[in-house]
């Protein structure tokens, strides 16, 4: 076996099925979306090439801008809940000695509930008819004036469709952060403590920088996930009332599949893809510190040198 | 090693091809299967009646005839799936569709059977209620869909609440608004509405334009020859804004079942729904707690008190490519048997037929049936049958905000007009 694995061609053959699958399931739809974004097609008859017309329309479309801003609000809430609350819970969990597994499981449960069930759960909590638990509690504690129809009030609806998504995956990120935190070398934390750092300082200055890679990974997942956020907002309000809780993905779906504008829908999809890639790149740059970049540059140069040496040695 | 791997790969490929070919040959020997992609409630009367007829037909043809029903009752999901299927070149043999602009596109592409022509050829045209067929027609008089239901829509009201507040059944739209105002002042929710499904809300928007112009206004609007801001449209919006304030709080997120339950539990005084909910209304009607009235009139308007929303529901359309002699024969069989079976399920049938004698009909059923015999020439056809899909979405979404007062009339007009312009410009 060792002999085969040394052969680069064998490597490629083993990688091929996964690669082909990836190309067909991920790359091909993206390429098709890009192709469709230059086309006008209502689902029937001839597809008409329209050049950049869909893109021009996109940047003139008021609803698209609404959806874009809504998506940013959605993103802030979802990221805030999943990363901050997830991290907070993970940190608290590290202080626990008993029942960690039980609590971890308990907090993880929302992740395994399907989106439709989560939606139903929140719909009944937000409801006015029959009165949901949120309004009931508000009235019980004498804050009845704040009771409202959460999903139809244009001031609250966007926040209300964002919260379930944040709530749903907080437990998952908690588990990831917890795993990262407990894998840290306790000696380092102890050294910090001996040097006079208090708990807060140890967390901010020592522990978090050490799980930077995990933070980057989770942020990437959360951000791209939030940019593509669809199921819960779609089922909960379908972007409504009006377009008040419209997200880019729900708008894309509406245009392509309800409005029969497959070309324009694809244009929005391409925008979402481009935006997600951009966000990942920005994150990468932000998370790569100056020292690290310098270090990488040096490593690269060293590799080059070694190569040159080898060649000249031959 | 490499050679062995290649051999294994080739063997798998060849085996796969042989197996695929084998299964295709097996399929060719199977009996004929006709697929109906339906948008009807599962185990609802239509679903049950058609299945029963198909079963009967299949038995008469020695089981070589199979009828497969794929149901998606949720209308928006249904339409999206249908459009996606058709876009992908997989149109089922029989589909459900209204005479919408999208349906016209299918007709223009030669994909649907001319049902009017078929009914005339088979001498079946006169077997239907004329209004039920007229509802299925496009504005140019052609017809590509077959009605399976026949309905009137009415406003159900709680007699007890009306009596307690000294209210009479409104005869005009103004009186209706007065009734709502009085109820509202008495702290009662005047009307419960299913806003989650959008269409019940849009009915209220369509009422005044229908009273003033019949369906002419919405036809001109959908064809881009009128603006939402024209007088008829503005009057519609004005009435809609007025009545919208009497809907229950949070109506935009209330679903069908909840809105209906609110009314039946006495939490709201009125509820707009068609005769298809007779079964749900039966008990309260029998107890004398509820009754109904039809859309109130407007003095001097084009349409009268006996003209309101009458519909024959979403129609059945046939794929022109697969509509062969066998399917024709089946459809004829359905039309000949459907009326009686469907009426026997306490439903109003679009096919003229005597009521089955072995079934006892409720007073409510018989009363509604009698009402249907005296409806006028005009009938309100829902706006979603006329508007293109995109404009329809815009109207549906934004009407909710209009009713709650979150957007004003001018904003709504501009949104609808922009969507119509887009459609007209072919975007």
Image (tube, rainbow, N blue to C red):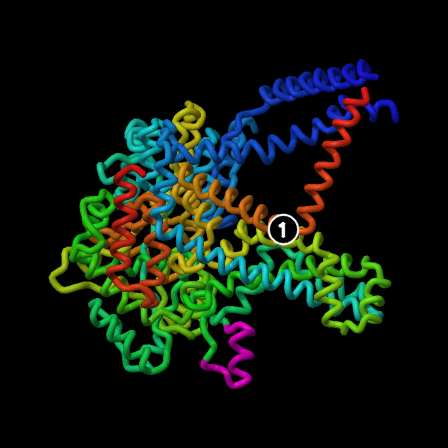
What is the number of callouts on the image? 1
Q: Position of residue A251 (x, y in %)?
A: 44, 49
* Dominant SS type (magenta): helix
Tell me: residue B400, above or below residue B49. Answer: below
- Could you tell me which quadrant the N terminus of chain B lies in? top right
Residue in the foreground of this view, choosing between A89 and B253: A89
Q: Chain of mark 1?
A: A
The residues colored magenta run A131-145
- Could you tell me which quadrant the C terminus of chain B lies in? top left
Q: Which residue is mark 1?
A: A221
Q: Position of residue B411 (x, y in %)?
A: 27, 59
Residue for point 70% across, 43% down: A296
Query: Would you say residue A188 sits in the magenta stretch?
Result: no
Res B48 visible: no
Residue for point 57% across, 55% down: A116
Residue in the foreground of this view, choosing between A126 and B107: A126
Q: Position of residue A278 (x, y in %)?
A: 53, 46
């Amino acid at each position: 076996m060792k002999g085969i694995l040394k052969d680069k061609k064998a490597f490629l053959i083993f990688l091929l099925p996964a690669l082909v699958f990836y190309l067909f399931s991920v790359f091909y739809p993206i390429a098709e979306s890009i192709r469709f974004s230059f086309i006008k097609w209502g689902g029937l008859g001839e597809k008409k090439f329209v050049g950049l017309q869909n893109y021009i329309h996109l940047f003139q479309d008021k609803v698209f801008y609404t959806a874009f801003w809504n998506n940013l609000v959605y993103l802030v809430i979802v990221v805030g809940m999943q990363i901050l609350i997830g991290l907070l819970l993970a940190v608290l969990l590290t202080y626990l000695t008993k029942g960690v597994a039980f609590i971890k499981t308990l907090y993880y449960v929302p992740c395994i509930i399907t989106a439709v069930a989560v939606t139903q759960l929140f719909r009944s909590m937000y409801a006015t008819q029959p009165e949901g638990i949120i309004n009931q509690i508000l009235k019980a504690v004498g804050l009845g004036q704040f009771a409202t129809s959460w999903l139809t009030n244009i001031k609250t609806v966007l926040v209300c469709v964002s919260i379930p998504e944040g709530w749903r995956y907080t437990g998952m990120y908690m588990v990831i952060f917890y795993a990262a935190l407990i894998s840290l070398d306790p000696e380092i934390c102890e050294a910090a403590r001996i040097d006079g750092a208090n708990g807060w300082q140890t967390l901010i200055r020592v522990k978090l920088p050490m799980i930077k890679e995990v933070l980057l990974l989770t942020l990437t997942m959360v951000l791209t996930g939030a940019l593509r956020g669809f199921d819960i907002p779609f089922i909960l309000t379908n972007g409504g009332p009006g377009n008040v809780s419209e997200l880019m993905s729900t708008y894309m779906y509406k245009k392509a599949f309800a409005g029969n504008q497959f070309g324009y829908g694809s244009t929005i999809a391409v925008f979402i893809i481009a935006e997600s890639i951009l966000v990942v790149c920005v994150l990468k740059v932000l998370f790569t510190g100056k020292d690290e970049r310098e270090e990488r540059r040096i490593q690269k140069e060293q590799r080059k040198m070694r190569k040159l040496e080898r060649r000249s040695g031959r | 090693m490499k050679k062995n791997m290649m051999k294994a790969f080739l063997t798998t490929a060849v085996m796969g091809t042989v197996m695929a070919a084998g299964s295709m040959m097996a399929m060719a020997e199977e009996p004929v299967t006709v697929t109906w992609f339906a948008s009807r409630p599962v185990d609802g009367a239509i679903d049950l009646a058609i299945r029963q007829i198909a079963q009967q037909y299949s038995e008469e043809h020695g089981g070589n005839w199979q009828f497969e029903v794929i149901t998606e009752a949720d209308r928006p999901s249904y339409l999206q799936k249908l459009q996606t299927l058709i876009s992908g070149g997989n149109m089922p043999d029989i589909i459900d569709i209204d005479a919408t602009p999208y349906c016209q596109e299918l007709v223009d592409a030669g994909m649907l059977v001319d049902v009017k022509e078929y009914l005339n050829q088979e001498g079946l045209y006169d077997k239907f209620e004329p209004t039920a067929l007229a509802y299925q027609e496009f504005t140019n008089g052609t017809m590509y869909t077959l009605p399976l239901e026949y309905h009137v829509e009415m406003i159900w009201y709680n007699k007890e609440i009306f009596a307690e507040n000294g209210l009479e059944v409104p005869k005009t739209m103004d009186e209706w608004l007065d009734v709502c105002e009085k109820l509202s002042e008495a702290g009662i929710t005047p009307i419960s509405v299913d806003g989650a499904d959008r269409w019940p809300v849009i009915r209220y928007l369509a009422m005044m334009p229908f009273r003033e112009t019949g369906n002419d206004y919405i036809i001109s609007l959908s064809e881009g020859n009128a603006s939402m801001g024209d007088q008829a449209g503005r009057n519609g919006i004005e009435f809609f804004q007025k009545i919208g304030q009497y809907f229950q709080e949070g109506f935009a997120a209330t679903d069908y079942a909840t809105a209906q339950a609110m009314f039946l539990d006495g939490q709201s005084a009125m509820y707009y729904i068609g005769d298809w909910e007779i079964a749900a209304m039966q008990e309260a009607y029998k107890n004398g707690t509820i009754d109904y009235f039809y859309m109130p009139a407007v003095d001097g308007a084009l349409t009268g008190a006996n003209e309101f929303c009458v519909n024959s529901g979403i129609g059945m359309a046939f794929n022109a490519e697969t509509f062969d002699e066998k399917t024709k024969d089946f459809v004829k069989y359905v039309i000949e048997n459907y009326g009686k079976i469907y009426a026997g399920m306490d439903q109003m049938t679009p096919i003229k037929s005597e009521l089955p004698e072995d079934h006892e009909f409720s007073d409510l059923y018989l009363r509604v049936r009698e009402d249907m015999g005296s409806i006028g020439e005009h009938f309100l056809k829902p706006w979603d049958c006329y508007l293109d899909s995109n404009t329809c979405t815009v109207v549906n979404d934004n009407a909710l905000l209009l009713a709650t007062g979150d957007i004003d009339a001018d904003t709504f007009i501009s949104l609808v007009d922009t969507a119509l312009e887009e459609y007209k410009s072919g975007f």
